[in-house]
Amino acid sequence: MVNSSSIPVVDSPPGTNELELTIFGPGIGECVLVHLGNGDWFVIDSCVYPKGKSPVALEYLQAMGVDPAKSIRRILATHWHDDHIRGIAQLLKACPDAGFIMSGALQGDQFFRLVLEVNASNRLVSGSSSAQEFADVLEILESRTSPAAIASPCMYAQDGSRLYAGGYRGTSEVWSLSPSASTITNAMKTLASKLVTPGKSKRFRPHSPNDVSVATLVRAGSWNLLLGADLENTVEPEFGWRAVLSSTARPTDVSQVFKVGHHGSQNAHHDDIWNTMLSSDPTSVITPYTRLSDKLPTTTDVSRIQARTKSLYCTTWPPSRKPTKRRAVDGIIAGAAKSRHALNTDRGYVRVRVDLSSSTAVPSVELFGSAAQL
Amino acid sequence: MKLAEPLTTADIENDNSVLASQPPSADDWIKPELETSWTETYAGSKVPSQETKVPKAVSYSAPINRQRLTTPSPPSQIKMLQQWECVIHEVSEECVSCELHDLTDSLCPTEFAEIYVSEFSDFDRPLLEEGAVFYWSVGRETSKTGQVRRYSELRLRRMPPLSKSKRREITRKAQQLGQLLIDSCR
């Protein structure tokens, strides 16, 4: 069943026996909320919608009358790209009881040094950078850990870690499928090479590669969700999706719902994900990426995924539009810019709900704002 | 006396005030006969010094208007229409792909653009790399003569290197954080 609404409508919260997956993706950024049942929410990544003041997870839950501070159990930052962590510090601050989980590839002093060094000299006037967000997250975590008792756990995710258990009848679980042990080792070396050389300033936009991303599997009742984050393929079998497919540490459940990895790009596609980790014709959701001139998903990407499922949705479609016209300005910059586009400001998102108490339940898919079925 | 006529020594002797307010005409420089040498005053007006004879054949140059040289001309006026803070995502030979955050109106949605590398000044081009931040200002410039031109300036942000003490402080803080988080993960 598909309902469509032109205005984002947030109605009542899911029932205690309902599994909910809500995916936000405004064109840059991504945030996934999972209601595991019984009022327990698990948040994966964070983004702020255009013209938005707060992280979308806070806005969404508050609009439904759910208190984020009491409901969000865990916040996972899948990787260190600013399109996935914008507003995550604000979210963490608003949820003092929520545990914070980050990729195991980002553990250690070197990552923290890199964050703090970049943050020391590279703050933006207009908003936040990934370094700023993470530096703020570290500050919050430090303030939590300095007292004697640690109220909420911090955790490093890697292949085969159970990140949370609770929710519906206490049996819902969230598992991390990546990064692999090899990815973690490799990331440590990469981070070391990016540290500031004495006497030099740091200009680069520091980020970890997508293979450190934390892909997750949610198990709730008879329903499973595969959430691909930005995990990509690599040539080497010990990294990315190839490592997930060959892992013996992860649960091997087949998922009926799929958040397609890395904005539907070819780099994140592997036939065996569809053949072995997903049911036939799974409900699939893409979050678009409009930052570069090569936007994702491309028409080829959409066709490739449509060949695998008839139920393909995108959180914002079209993901970009022409910039607002200002004749005086447009004339001046026309000669300097080869191309120019703006984010689609319609707040689109996709929501899937299913009743966990019924063995014959059919999931409902709801599209809000500029979300669309492809 | 007719002001348009060249001044003579007699004129000078008779009426210094006229001379002080009236600059010599072009003919004065072309056909000097018996001329007065000029001295500059603070205000830039010219008064004759003690009369001296200037030989006819001597080449003659225009007096220096010191006021013009030392006082800046009225600056051109720039009316800023829009400013962005831009973060570079990719640099190719031809273009810089970047994300534009509007500093003029924070409610404007984020934009993305490919800007030609040739638009950046020579001394900024070596700094073009992923993660670099620059500011783009566009507007209209009205020159002192009233001419209106389009104005566009791209300026890379420069960052000082971290001091030794700052780096030491960061290293210490990072080690502390690393230990705290490891402890909390147990």
Image: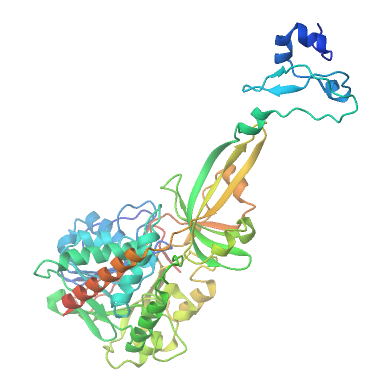
Query: Vertically, is A229 above or below A254?
Result: above
The answer to which of A188 and A184 lies nearer the viewer is A188
Residue found farthest to the left: A148
Query: Vertically, is A263 above or below A347?
Result: below
The x, y position of residue B164, in whole percent, is: 36, 66
Q: Residue at position x 31%, y 66% from top?
A: A134
Residue B39 lies left or right of residue B161; in this view the side is right
Q: Residue at position x 44%, y 52% from top?
A: B109
Of the 4 image quadrants, the one containing the N terminus of chain A is bottom left
Query: Vertically, is A337 above or below A209?
Result: above
Residue A282 lies left or right of residue B134; in this view the side is left
Q: Residue at position x 25%, y 57% from top?
A: A11
Instruction: Find residue A128 and report its image quarter.
Output: bottom left
The x, y position of residue B1, in whole percent, is: 81, 6
The answer to which of A288 and A113 lies nearer the viewer is A113
Query: Vertically, is A262 above or below A88?
Result: below
Instruction: Find residue A91 and report its image quarter.
Output: bottom left
Instruction: Find residue A49 and report its image quarter.
Output: bottom left
Answer whether residue B178 is visible to the viewer in this image.
yes
The x, y position of residue A273, in whole percent, is: 39, 86
Answer whether residue A85 is visible to the viewer in this image.
no
The answer to which of A362 and A307 lies nearer the viewer is A307
Residue B40 lies left or right of residue A123; in this view the side is right
The x, y position of residue A217, in whole percent, is: 28, 80
The image's colour scheme reads rainbow
Q: How many marks?
A: 0
Q: Residue at position x 25%, y 78% from top?
A: A156
Residue found farthest to the right: B57
The answer to which of A129 and A265 lies nearer the viewer is A129
